[in-house]
Amino acid sequence: MWFDLHADIGYDIYKEHLLGNDNRFQEYHLPRLLKDNVSGVCIACFFGDYESWEVMQDCVLFARNQILNSDVQFVLSKEDLKSDKFKVILTIEGMYGIQDDVANKIQWLYDQGVRIGSLCWNEENALATGVRGTVDHGITALGREAILKMQELGMILDVSHLNDKSFFDVMEYDLPIIATHSNARALCSALRNLSDEQLEVLKKRDTLVGLNAYGNFVNDDESLRDCKHLVEHAKYFESKLGLSRIACGFDFMDFYDPNTFMLADMQNSSELHNLESALSKVYNKKDILRIASLNTLDFLKKYL
Ligand SMILES: [Zn+2]
């Protein structure tokens, strides 16, 4: 029933490959996700602030191969969403490795099956500036080329890691926008969360925001990092954007960093039932299903 818009599984696949394991997705991730009632996932190839274009290519190719070698539906277009199989979308988180020849490199990513991408992680790179970068730096000339190429190809631009200036620069463009894994800044002050001003702009776009289960983005008070308080972000997004815009992008990372604190009652996908029960205190079954997966599927049907 769940569709997770953000998991660094592409990164994990590549990391495991470097350790000599080339079956990480089939043997580890897929069985877990199926058991945990997840019906689809966006597999992010994550790049921080040092990777070359060659490393980006390697990571994407290994993630792609493992998707192709698994009994899943590799979603490349809206037609693929009709499949009953577990659905996988290949995504890019951060494009540090793209420093020139932008249009051809974006084209290459698209040709490998990448359908959602963010221009940067938290860093400042040749295309854009993330939340840890210089406050008044936004989208660069190369970044604008990247956005236009993504628009031409029909790719979806993920705004989750952009700093505020880059975020508002992106809003000048008319391509599909999504915030795959960000909460509301009004409820938790992390800069990775969306401000009211940003939500005001997102309200005018046909977009989705994915609830993030990383503790630091749920509540400033460590004792309040639980499913109940994640549901408060859903209620807040509902008040600002409407129920049809709320989705899930949990950002679980237990599979490569078991020490990361997510939520007291939801450390990974095996505890999604706790989120379901917290949601059921304020939402009926139909609305929970919308948040868990249907809103995401509706959005992807429109834009893939
Ligand atoms: Zn992220």
Image (cartoon, grey):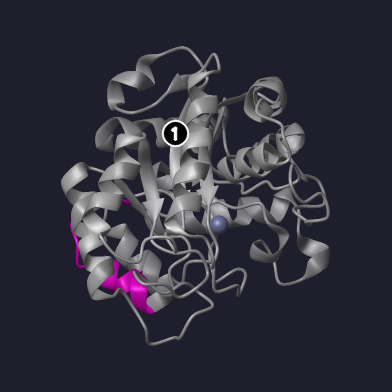
Is residue 74 depicted above or below 47 in this figure? above
Residue at coordinates 28% horizontally, 34% vertically from top-left?
304
Q: Quadrant of residue 4?
A: top right
Of 63 and 202, the residue lying toward us: 63
Is-magenta flag for residue 35? Answer: no
Q: Secondary structure at mark 1?
A: strand
Residue 125: % across, % down: 42, 72
Boundaries of the magenta span: 165-177
Residue 180 in sight here: no
How many labels, in total?
1
Residue 61: % across, % down: 47, 36
Q: Is residue 140 shown left or right of residue 283?
A: left
Query: Dividing the image into four equal quarters, which quarter contains ligand 1?
Result: bottom right
Of 265 and 54, the residue lying toward us: 54
Q: Disc 1, ligand 1: is the CB inside 8 Å?
A: no
Is-magenta flag for residue 173? Answer: yes
Is residue 67 depicted above or below 283 in this figure? above
Determine which residue is flagged by label 1: 89
- Residue type at tag 1: Ile
Q: Is residue 226 shown left or right of residue 241?
A: right
Placement of the N terminus among the 4 image quadrants: top right
Residue 82: % across, % down: 36, 16
Residue at coordinates 56% horizontally, 41% vertically from top-left?
10
